[in-house]
Image (cartoon, coloured by chain):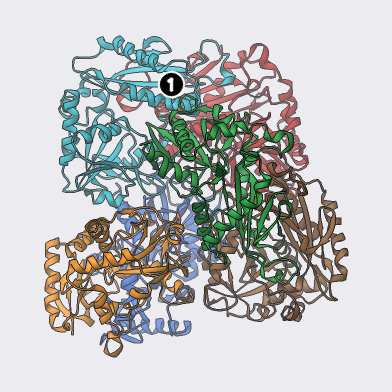
Chain colours: A orange, B blue, C brown, D green, E red, F cyan
Amino acid sequence: MRKVYFNGKMIPENQAKISIYDSALMFGDMVFEMTRSFNQEQFKLVEHIERLYAGLKILEIPIAMTQDEMLSACYETIDANSDFFEDGDEHRLMIDVSRGLLGIYQGIEGIESGPNVIIADFPLKWTVSSMGKLFDTGINVVIPSQRVIPSRYLDPKIKNRSRIHYLMANIEISKYEGNNNWALMLDEDGFVAEGTGDNFFLVKNGEVITPEPRNILRGISRDYVLQELCPQLNINATEKNIEPYDVYNADEAFITGTPFSMLPVTSINGLPIGNGQVGGIFSKILAQWSLNVGLDIEAQIKSWQGANTSNGPTPYKFK
Amino acid sequence: MRKVYFNGKMIPENQAKISIYDSALMFGDMVFEMTRSFNQEQFKLVEHIERLYAGLKILEIPIAMTQDEMLSACYETIDANSDFFEDGDEHRLMIDVSRGLLGIYQGIEGIESGPNVIIADFPLKWTVSSMGKLFDTGINVVIPSQRVIPSRYLDPKIKNRSRIHYLMANIEISKYEGNNNWALMLDEDGFVAEGTGDNFFLVKNGEVITPEPRNILRGISRDYVLQELCPQLNINATEKNIEPYDVYNADEAFITGTPFSMLPVTSINGLPIGNGQVGGIFSKILAQWSLNVGLDIEAQIKSWQGANTSNGPTPYKFK
Amino acid sequence: MRKVYFNGKMIPENQAKISIYDSALMFGDMVFEMTRSFNQEQFKLVEHIERLYAGLKILEIPIAMTQDEMLSACYETIDANSDFFEDGDEHRLMIDVSRGLLGIYQGIEGIESGPNVIIADFPLKWTVSSMGKLFDTGINVVIPSQRVIPSRYLDPKIKNRSRIHYLMANIEISKYEGNNNWALMLDEDGFVAEGTGDNFFLVKNGEVITPEPRNILRGISRDYVLQELCPQLNINATEKNIEPYDVYNADEAFITGTPFSMLPVTSINGLPIGNGQVGGIFSKILAQWSLNVGLDIEAQIKSWQGANTSNGPTPYKFK
Amino acid sequence: MRKVYFNGKMIPENQAKISIYDSALMFGDMVFEMTRSFNQEQFKLVEHIERLYAGLKILEIPIAMTQDEMLSACYETIDANSDFFEDGDEHRLMIDVSRGLLGIYQGIEGIESGPNVIIADFPLKWTVSSMGKLFDTGINVVIPSQRVIPSRYLDPKIKNRSRIHYLMANIEISKYEGNNNWALMLDEDGFVAEGTGDNFFLVKNGEVITPEPRNILRGISRDYVLQELCPQLNINATEKNIEPYDVYNADEAFITGTPFSMLPVTSINGLPIGNGQVGGIFSKILAQWSLNVGLDIEAQIKSWQGANTSNGPTPYKFK
Amino acid sequence: MRKVYFNGKMIPENQAKISIYDSALMFGDMVFEMTRSFNQEQFKLVEHIERLYAGLKILEIPIAMTQDEMLSACYETIDANSDFFEDGDEHRLMIDVSRGLLGIYQGIEGIESGPNVIIADFPLKWTVSSMGKLFDTGINVVIPSQRVIPSRYLDPKIKNRSRIHYLMANIEISKYEGNNNWALMLDEDGFVAEGTGDNFFLVKNGEVITPEPRNILRGISRDYVLQELCPQLNINATEKNIEPYDVYNADEAFITGTPFSMLPVTSINGLPIGNGQVGGIFSKILAQWSLNVGLDIEAQIKSWQGANTSNGPTPYKFK
Amino acid sequence: MRKVYFNGKMIPENQAKISIYDSALMFGDMVFEMTRSFNQEQFKLVEHIERLYAGLKILEIPIAMTQDEMLSACYETIDANSDFFEDGDEHRLMIDVSRGLLGIYQGIEGIESGPNVIIADFPLKWTVSSMGKLFDTGINVVIPSQRVIPSRYLDPKIKNRSRIHYLMANIEISKYEGNNNWALMLDEDGFVAEGTGDNFFLVKNGEVITPEPRNILRGISRDYVLQELCPQLNINATEKNIEPYDVYNADEAFITGTPFSMLPVTSINGLPIGNGQVGGIFSKILAQWSLNVGLDIEAQIKSWQGANTSNGPTPYKFK
């Protein structure tokens, strides 16, 4: 069975559990990261860990590990799991840090006080196995009634577990007619913010545009597109306030997210974006990404289609 | 060791844990209740369970148990723990319901899919042992920079675990000079909302006033004061928008919460409310409550002072 | 062919048209009312006309007719149409008042300058013929992403034609799965406002509650329920800020609107309200209304079912 | 008499009318454009039609015509009217598209179901004949109490007829002392948005600045100034949030609009902008525009002064 | 020459001055009250002083005087001025309390450190001499673009000197056409708040309604009307959110303020309220007030008309 | 004794006072500037005077003096005070302009009607004498509950005296534990605005970033850093919306203000910014500033430490 790093020990995946008295379960008081590998090589792991520590600092969770130690722990976890991964599998790490037991529970025998550091290693394919076809059809983004929480109340830039509203948005969108519907949430001003686990981009007149980094998680994939891939391709890329009007009138659109890198968005609320097909700039950027990491991202995900139906878990649901 | 009800089984308290792949830990996706007994008799347990089910319905968590079965499970849990409680101890129940494993994790051997129903029974005294003196000095409420999340984004009336902002408010207030500081949070309009685990009341010209039930948890203790105790005492009690100005000019103030029932508030931001003493109406209502439940609430809490220092856990912190 | 009152003349219904240069078409600058009869007797016609004139005053549309003259014109219109109505038909009046031609167009030969007063008489049955079954199943209200415009920007209490956002809400809801979906719009604070042509009520603990009259049209049927029917039945009825949470936890719910008087609401976003059945208080109020006007409102609408399929227009769409 | 294109036919201008049952009159549900010619040559007609179709798409009005067919229809309309225009007249086209009859009215004999496409051709001079002197005096912009509707409620970028609030702003400003007062509306944040039919610009330190394109109609003339004229003249031109403070401290200001191209703004709320005179950059840009289109825009408008007094309609009112 | 109480001394009125280094001039950091007499008897002086001290407490101005000492100081001031008042004059007291010198200026020789307590006694007639005719014509309230500052930023319930926005509203309204225009300010939600020195009331169906006490100064005259005069006359009086729509449709309206007690409001933005005449309920309440204080308030103010033209100061301007 | 310019005359500093009837004390209706010298040379005096006149214009204070005359008056004031300054002292000018007496007070003998123009000259050292150590330790900025007033209600860009909320923020922060706490205020959106007398900057990846110039005073020192010092040093400097998240994650931070030029910010809410030390870019910019003005700014302020303890006023408090 896969192993999970838990405060320095490797334990079986199904024993990786958190006490009901942990602040993580009392207050959603946990910071986390999700990473992935390309060809078994972790991608931007240092950047993920930096973002993790930014959240820990602001929430004042008194973690003892340094960022370097965290990095080492990640690699240890991957090593400990190598036997449980098939050839060609990619490692999706989930790093969780909770504050630990609230004060009054700290005397209970047999529960570690915390903070708790947990690193789980999971085959990426099960996360994305149902997404292959989306590279051809694209996603239909739907604007739910549920808005993102403005950052002054609860900052989405801190990647934390108090985020039931993302789940609520997903439930709402599941009631829409049609397939391939993904939620695209607006902020209080009516600006496009983000999906419930992804960042949004549009393309207009050859320029790549993504929402200002205010009411969103500043995704690592988002930064990679903005700051590395687009410059590499001489594509102008900027952050701007985007309204639904701009999406309706875009030439193309796409989303980014760690598990799938990029997916095309071909319609909004059922109305086509551009010509309703996967866009050329999307394809160009994805190709560059594939080139940079040395594997065909789209082909790999398509190759995993159905992976889960026989003996794996059920497909991706409510990201 | 104390036992915890976990999906129909009684397990040791330190084994009551939730998988890291549970929606509760992924999204703060858990509904809960905290109840207490007076003289070992659960107080308003039915009302707590009704509120729990209201939250489950809106979040669409597909629980199979009926409200009656939940009630029975609570009593079973208390029975299973009676040997672990000292005489005079009161039973504080914590009922947790999580949606369970997200789809892609449902195939992992040895983790229940959920929904998960958990009932823990904990000696109330450790929750309140440090509060005895507050019945004499009163609390100083401090208004933090952190505002409550407006209910249209994430409804506080659903008692759920996506609530790290309460913890942030507590951390902020811990940096103020002085003792007995408790956070009193405002809403977006600048109206008084609630504490980070309690409801607020003021008294003006003999009338008891509490914030409108919009951006708050509608506490069971709050309802008891409004709808039963005040009418019993012929005290006029109403819900109204309250501003800090009104608190500064109140005759008295107090808070309510399940663990301690009621506590006096004698100052705001360091400035006295009324004459800065525990108020007469507060005392009258608390006396009636004590009468109704057949024990002296204040005396009981004072009797527990220091209970924890010798062999129990550390005192109440960050409610 | 039916006749339409047009600035004092009776013209054929298909000639009742407005110049493209009229302020009504330039700016949505038209105030209107919809009324109906019970047993060919107009209901609350005076109240409708008063509301019409309140809007005309605030928009400063310089109408020359008095309210009494307007009343007479309504009756003339009904008389002129009596031959074109079948036995048992009810008269639905639509009263439109536009400012008329903008200045630069006032010289064009053959177009009246305005203000224009138009009264059309239309068989009510075609408006409601498809609604009979809703008295049994109830409506499912769905909360769209589209919010009502706050009254400080454009006051919905002025019944005017600048209201494309109602139509947008209807289009949005038409994409939800299921039947009998009607939009229930929220305001900027997340309070329930109104449907796209109806007012909302809930019932809780025997009390009838409807949103505060701020961001809504203050419907004549709404007032009738609040101020006449409920008092007649000794039912307590009040205006209050209502949130979706309150609707999820209501015992019953219903809407009011001139064409159908009242319709039961049995679910919200697909989740049952109360026991998911038509409520007892709803039935009681509707029965009283029927008694007061001397006809069985529900039975009459059910009797019209299919009226339109043979030779009338297509059914009610986008109220 | 002038002819109007109406669903493929040319009809007399005073017969160009819309049924009272059309969605345009029921909901302000009509998208439109206003264009003009310079030397009888339509200006940016393709851009106007593109914007029209952007609105039709978002409102989901199912028009059958392609953009090319619409373009042809415009030219046909101009041809059909050439005999009714004097030498030197310019053609102002108004293109209207309505959804057509609501469902229940679709069976009425003699009314086209729609969507309705209407193109009217009107002598531009009557729209602008009173504006000649404003090129010398400039306009005094006045900030009314009426704010623009935030775009998340009703998007002004869709050029539609639900816009009675523009008219309300004009009525409000008409009560101010003085002449040449035009409304300059703010948005909810207090940023300058737009006039009631024009876009606003200021000049500061040689740079041309106009509000961000959020709560405004993105005017074709505005785009022409920003994207063509300023670059042509090597003037830096940007979109920025502008507050009244910035207008009070600007060096110059002006507005743009299709009928008049550009007009100088020399004061705000009665206080001078810059030295209170028509600005040099304004004049430079207008001169370039005149050059580009091959006629002196200002002189042409001045030449039309009084055109309407003898035999035309009354002057421009409530833009 | 009239005398002013200044930190315990009586000094000539033209020597009553504040150092430029006083916090009052640095930050608008001064709390104040305006009172008046009827028949030389101070009206509600205790209530005014209570409100003054509420403000001092919240601003934490460390005044040494008790409320009783303040009361005595007021009477001393009146006594000291009795020779300078004509028969029939009423005493308008202005009580000012400033925090005093900021720290770095406290060493300057010859400036008192403060807090400073100042009581000036001024003939009321000069404040109201131009208002007599308003009892016959009524006021036209005009809604300016300037909104009140929401109380969570700067609480208007603290009667303080940081209130330049009231002056800005007055300047704005002075540019409207017509006479007798007074500003009626809205709050952020578009609710009617207050005038720039008066509270607003409307009358509808025999009920007296005034805005909720949130974004306003809670006037002493306002309280007197609500809590004493209306009950005395068996008139129902309540606090409610009021919108301009409600004012347009009111039966009557009026304002209250210490100098003039009450004035009728007969129109809003130039449109008549009710029949455009002084209202009957207004007259009834004013008559009762006159009865209670033993003088005809309206007659007294009318008798002072022109008082100032010969030898007094210029009339009331920018209240 | 030092002299103060008062409407053209030089009067002793302790006689520089404002009548209690002046609009400045009635409404906080006064515009002001604070300037300083370096080596007795006034810095950016023209820019300060321009900003003063921008405020006077918007508030419509009818000052008769030209900007040139104001400049001369400043120099006259400095000359008149040269004997009262020690060698090495710097001249801090405070320029105040008030509207003067409200109308009804204009006849009182012996009080100038105004507008009043006042220029005071004060040794800068007493303002900054306690700040020397802050160049080593840095400031801890603390975010208070008090937000800045949004500029649409009261524009902070007009440097005026209605600003008690700055003082309220200072009082609030004075209750925090620790030393060197300075308030850093947020705006309504949760963006960092400004201190209570200073502008905020952060440094990230070598770039200097300061809040957009919306809800702040646009400081002269702020402009100098942005537009002169950073370009001089080839440091990229921009205006951007900044959130607390950005401050927590900044590399360095600092504030600017006329009296002290620049001060390092080393922590926020007690958590270190960057490595918690004074930043390198801060030091570079300050060094350049010192170079430009020909004196070591930090050394000068440190040399004044204790200056006030012997014979001057108490130190800087509540800026």
Question: Which quadrant of the view contains residue C223?
Answer: bottom right
Helix, strand or loop at label 1? It is strand
Most distant residue in the bottom direction: A310
Residue A44 image position (x, y, % from top left): 19, 64
Circle 1 chain: F
Q: Nearer the viewer, residue E18 or D13?
A: D13
* Residue C155 makes an appearance in the image: no
**Where does the N terminus of chain C fall, quadrant-wise?**
bottom right
Check disc 1 and report the residue beneath it.
Answer: F97
Q: Amino acid at mark 1?
A: Val
Task: Name the residue rendered at 69%, 33% in the picture.
Answer: E139
Task: Evaluate whether residue A234 shows in this view.
Answer: yes
Residue E258: image location, x then y, percent: 62, 31
| C9 in relation to E152, above or below | below
> How dense is the environment of label 1, judged by Cα within 10 Å: few (below 14), some, or many (20 and up)?
many
- Where is residue B243 drawn, in percent x and y? 49, 48
In x, y percent, where is residue A306?
30, 85
Quarter holding the C terminus of chain C? bottom right
Observer-nearest residue: A1 or A225? A225
Instruction: Return the residue nearer the eye: B144 or F285.
Output: F285
The structure residue drawn at horizontal position 37% and vertical position 31%, both measured from the top left corner, is: D205
User: What residue is at 31 percent from the left and 37 percent from the top?
Assistant: F199
User: In this view of the protein, which residue sits in the foreground, C52 or E70?
Assistant: C52
Q: Quadrant of residue A256?
A: bottom left
**Above or below A198: residue E89:** above
